[in-house]
């Protein structure tokens, strides 16, 4: 008997499953907020050299503010005062002759003055992470996502070993503690370390909750669950600019976006353990408890009496239940090795493209809050369209098409003039929409590709590859100093490469989830014909007892 048969008897998408999705939604809301937090707390407002020391010495006497800037700070090509340079001595002759091209300059000697009209405080204003130190400011995103990458590997392995529910609580608590602690940092080093562990902690939320939701629903509703999970990201991406607009102090903003985890911890007790995982690990008593709970909440009590630990032991899981699986199992056998390689490349490409576009919200000359909101809002219609496409054209074609669309949009913006702000932003929005579609698809797609016994390991590995792409995205954007369009060229190439690799993956539409590694090696994936019809597999189909009685 397949687990899907049993799940269909007690309703594979009833109140029980909806409860799981709603509770998971609360915690998942904080993830996109933290992932996009760097766009606001690491923002660099307009700045110039601090001239207060010269003011105190009476050098300027009765000069106006504009005249003071003229004699102390060189002018850039666009006519604005330099952000990082000043004259070693006041050049009073510039009051009558504005040509300063041949004059010597030095770095700012007494710090900087920042424009606080948009942000009350940011990391840049807190620790002067500008000019020669601006690389440290950009590195905060890389540091955070490096933590996410290592966290994905850790939580992926541990949740396959100790269960989904236990490690989800560990992720909640660690993410909240490190997130709040980072807001009280007294130095950049302290902040960077705590930010790393914040990313390490919260990444377990996304990979564990996604897998847990998929493992509790039937085949026909898996795509709906994937889309709903994606909507939590859309909601978070749309809300973070509004939150950042109201809370423009970086410390307070960090605490605010972490606070939903308090509610997540309080509601954790109602989240069930994965019955699939329990059965795969020989824990039939606990699996029976949660399946009975599912039947009761879904009002399918007539089937509850037919579910016993003995009947659960007949669920098709041919590999040893006392065996501990690890990341090495992803590469021990040929087809698993190929699957891990292909999905890893796709995840890297999807994440690098998505966040490469998302982090570039100041690159189009428009309001930072408006750009972020539009970037988030565009994901709503895209996510809804993915729900339609996943069944109509399949997981693989949706993934390939969305990556191709993102690559084309990135290529178009390479050739559009920089002064066409609105058109460039529109094209970037379309690219962001396509990249969001690829992300929505790849989370569901990859969770369907890996077998239950190593699914969390597979998702942890894939998430790590994705976070590697995210970690490098801010550094890719810094390459505009080498060549203005180099970041766009690299992101476009990555998207197109991932598109080609995704084309090599198998389709999973309407197919039973593989339970064991042997299922992958033997190609034993079943196909649901819909509803109550019999599920075809390459194994001998064993219908549930309830179905047999209904047909007789």
Image (cartoon, grey):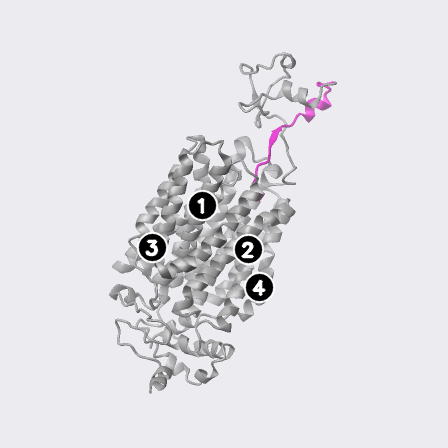
Evaluate if marks 3 and 4 touch, with contact meaning CB atoms under 8 Å apart: no
- Rounded to the nearest angstrom, the CA distance separating label 2 from label 4 is 13 Å
The location of residue 265, given as percent across then percent down, is: 57, 64
* Residue on which the image places disc 2: 30
Q: Is residue 493 above or below residue 505?
A: above
Q: Secondary structure at mark 4?
A: helix
Label located before the other in sequence (4 or 1):
4
Q: Nearer the viewer, mark 2 or mark 4?
A: 2
Q: CA distance from mark 4 to mark 1?
A: 37 Å
The residue indicated by pointer 1 is 430
Magenta stretch bounds:
40-61
Q: Earlier in the sequence, mark 3 or mark 4?
A: 4
Q: Secondary structure at mark 2?
A: helix
Quarter of the image where one finds residue 513: bottom left
Residue 168 is left or right of residue 344, and the answer is right
Mark 2 or 1 closer to N-term? 2
- Asked where in the image residue 192 lies, by quadrant, the reply is top right
Q: Position of residue 297 (x, y in %)?
A: 51, 77
- Could you tell me which secondary element the residue under label 1 belongs to? helix
Pointer 3 and pointer 1: residues touching (CB < 8 Å)?
A: no
| Horizontal side, residue 303 vs residue 361: left or right | left
Residue 53 among magenta residues = yes
Whole-percent x, y for residue 398 in the image: 37, 54
Measured in 3D between alpha carbons, the distance from the residue under mark 3 to the one under mark 4, in whole angstroms, is 38 Å
Examine the rendering and report whether any part of residue 496 can be seen. yes
- How many angstroms separate mark 3 from mark 1 (CA)? 18 Å
Residue 265: give its label: 4
Q: Which mark is residue 547?
A: none
Q: Which residue is mark 3?
A: 397
Give the quadrant of the C terminus: bottom left
Q: CA distance from mark 3 to mark 2?
A: 30 Å
């Amino acid at each position: 008997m397949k687990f899907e048969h049993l799940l269909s008897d007690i309703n594979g998408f009833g109140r029980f499953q909806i409860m799981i999705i709603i509770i998971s939604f609360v915690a998942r809301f904080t993830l996109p907020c933290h992932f996009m937090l760097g766009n606001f707390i690491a923002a660099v407002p307009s700045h110039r050299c601090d001239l207060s020391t010269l003011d105190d010495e009476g050098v300027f006497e009765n000069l106006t503010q504009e005249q003071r800037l003229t004699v102390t700070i060189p002018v850039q090509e666009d006519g604005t005062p330099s952000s990082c340079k000043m004259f070693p001595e006041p050049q009073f002759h510039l009051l009558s002759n504005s040509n300063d091209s041949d004059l010597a300059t030095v770095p700012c000697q007494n710090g900087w003055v920042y424009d606080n009209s948009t942000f009350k405080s940011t990391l840049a204003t807190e620790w002067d992470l500008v000019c020669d130190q601006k690389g440290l400011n950009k590195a905060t995103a890389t540091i955070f996502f490096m933590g996410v990458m290592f966290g994905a590997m850790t939580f992926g392995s541990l949740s396959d070993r100790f269960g989904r529910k236990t490690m989800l609580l560990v992720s909640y608590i660690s993410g909240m503690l490190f997130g709040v602690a980072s807001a009280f940092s007294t130095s950049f080093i302290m902040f960077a370390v705590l930010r790393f562990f914040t990313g390490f902690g919260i990444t377990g939320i996304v990979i564990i909750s996604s897998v847990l939701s998929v493992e509790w629903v039937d085949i026909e509703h898996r795509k709906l669950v994937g889309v709903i999970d994606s909507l939590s990201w859309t909601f978070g991406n749309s809300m973070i600019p509004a939150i950042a607009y109201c809370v423009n102090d970086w410390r307070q903003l960090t605490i605010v976006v972490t606070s939903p985890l308090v509610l997540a911890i309080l509601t954790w007790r109602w989240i069930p353990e994965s019955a699939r995982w329990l059965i795969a690990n020989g824990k039939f008593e606990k699996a029976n408890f949660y399946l009975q709970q599912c039947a009761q909440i879904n009002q399918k009590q007539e089937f509850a009496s037919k579910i016993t630990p003995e009947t659960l032991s007949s669920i098709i899981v041919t590999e040893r239940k006392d065996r501990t699986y690890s990341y090495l199992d992803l590469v021990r056998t040929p087809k698993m090795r190929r699957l891990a390689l292909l999905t890893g490349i796709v995840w890297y490409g999807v994440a690098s493209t998505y966040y490469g576009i998302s982090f570039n919200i100041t690159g189009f000359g428009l309001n930072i809050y408006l750009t972020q909101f539009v970037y988030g809002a565009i994901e709503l219609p895209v996510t809804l369209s993915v729900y339609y496409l996943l069944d109509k054209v399949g997981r693989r074609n949706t993934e390939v098409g969305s990556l191709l669309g993102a690559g084309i949009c990135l290529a178009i913006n390479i050739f559009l003039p920089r002064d066409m702000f609105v058109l460039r932003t529109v094209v970037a929005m379309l690219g962001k929409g396509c990249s969001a579609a690829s992300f929505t698809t790849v989370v569901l797609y990859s969770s369907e590709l890996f077998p239950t016994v190593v699914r969390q390991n597979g998702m942890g590995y894939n998430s790590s590859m994705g976070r590697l792409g995210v970690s490098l995205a801010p550094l890719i954007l810094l390459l505009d100093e080498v060549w203005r369009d180099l970041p766009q060229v690299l992101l476009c190439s990555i998207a197109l490469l991932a598109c080609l690799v995704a084309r090599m993956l198998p389709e999973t539409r309407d197919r039973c989830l593989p339970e064991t590694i042997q299922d992958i090696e033997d190609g034993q994936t079943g196909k649901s014909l819909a509803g109550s019809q019999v599920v075809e597999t390459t194994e001998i189909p064993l219908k549930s007892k309830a179905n047999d009685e209904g047909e007789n």
